[in-house]
Amino acid sequence: MAKALVKYFGIALVLILVTFLICSEARSNKSSSSSSRTIRFPLYHREKFLASNFKDQRSLVRTRLARDNARFHRRHASSSAQFHKHSGNDLNHTAVLEEGGEYVTVLKVGSPSQNVQLLVDIGTPLTWWQCQPNCKYCYSTPHHIFDTSRSSTYTETNCAEGFCDVTQLFILGCIRRDDPKCHYRVQYVDGSVSQGVMARDVVATSEGVTLHNSFSFGCGRSNQGVTMFNADATGILGFVPGGYSLPSQLQANTFTFCLPTYNTTSSGSLYLNYYPSAFQYSSRSMLIIIMGHYYLDFSGVEINGEAIPIPPENWQCDREGVGGVIIDTGSTITRFPKKAYDIFKDYFLRNAQGLPLSQPEEQLDTCFNVAGVGAWEGFVPKVRFLFKWPSGRPLEFETGQLLMSVGNNKYCLAFGAGGPTTIIGSWQLQGSLVGFDLPNHLVGFLRASC
């Protein structure tokens, strides 16, 4: 008994210390046990499916920035509402989540299998996709909508089954006495809603490797207002550990993204049960998950080897998860708190005096016209992110991760001013390996490794 208590309190102390390092008194989620098999999924940037719709680079970039700006403002306006219960009509509770992401992958679902294209979202715990027939409201998409009538292994979940976990905020359970099916409802911060029944079926990779013979997912029969990704996917693949996310159901407590660049049609990779040993020699940060976000123990920024004087309170967060520094592959640019961004921008411009300034582009307020500037990349300052522990190795960015081309020799700094929480976006992470080791509370970065 005494040994058990010592072990228990020892584990509790470790968790408290990890939490304290990143966000004082914030809450963390537990990890699932892992299987040993490494699983690969192809990972595409969503612009692969959009680029042909635009007449030039500038119109594509403006749409990209509008998408990112909308995600930021929805997050900023409703940060207090996320993962909270809301009462309404006969629906007992609803999870309010951010929707979308910048990357998509493909699963094979059912028997015989059907391709289902999904947005990968590391800020969502629920996996769902549209289902037909009898879809009351299915948004229009060029991609195949899963047809339950064609799958011999498709099963809808009843409320009496253990698969209907009403402790999850988005699981409603039974909503009528004459209906034994387990219902779900998820609302996103832009007001869009997906609802339907929880179901199970065989799921495999796009190459046909079986992942799970009874994978639980939301079978969306009413998907209203979901307009952010109509051309890109038919649902969302959740990646927040716990509940009905992909890593939890496959018992994967390590996963690594090889993020493809924005301006390519080639695929990157998403690996489950994979955290390469090379990360121990790379940039690493302590990691904790709070309210569906991945928080880092960020300590500052260097420009050309000089630590810029941003007060450390800009990187700290409170017990509600307000403030701090998160990694979000669903956001594009990196945003600092306003005061921190002003200091960062000032030091960047001081060190980029060989680059002629140009007019701002949408929310990107620091732009350059490099026409006629020979070897202009040499005038771009070196920017590095610093982390407190355990490796102390900074994360350095290449020019293509700092500046965004908007066409006609114009490049803009892919950073901006945001709210109290710093968001490290996918523009800075493109072309890199980003690995998550949940049991050890670590995230690793390998620059330009894809």
Image: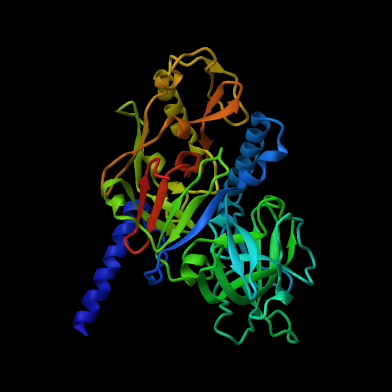
Residue 209 horizontal side relative to residue 148, left or right: left
Count of numbered circles in the view: 0
**Residue farthest along the left direction in this orientation:** 2
Name the image quarter holding residue 164. Answer: bottom right
Q: Is residue 122 visible?
A: no
Q: Residue at x 34, y 64 (%)?
A: 439
> For the C terminus, which image quadrant?
top left
Q: Residue at x 47, y 28 (%)?
A: 342
**Closest to the observer: 308 or 313?**
308
> For the N terminus, which image quadrant?
bottom left
Residue 131 horizontal side relative to residue 30, left or right: right
Q: Position of residue 94 (x, y in %)?
A: 64, 66
Coloring basis for residues: rainbow
Residue 207 horizontal side relative to residue 193, left or right: left
Residue 211 drawn above or below residue 440:
below
Q: Position of residue 311 (x, y in %)?
A: 36, 35
Q: Position of residue 397 (x, y in %)?
A: 40, 35
Q: Residue at x 31, y 58 (%)?
A: 18
Residue 208 drawn above or below residue 289:
below
Residue 281 horizontal side relative to residue 97, left or right: left
Q: Is residue 268 visible?
A: yes
**Closest to the observer: 180 or 318?**
180
Q: Position of residue 93 (x, y in %)?
A: 64, 70
Q: Residue at x 55, y 62 (%)?
A: 238
Residue 434 drawn above or below residue 205:
above
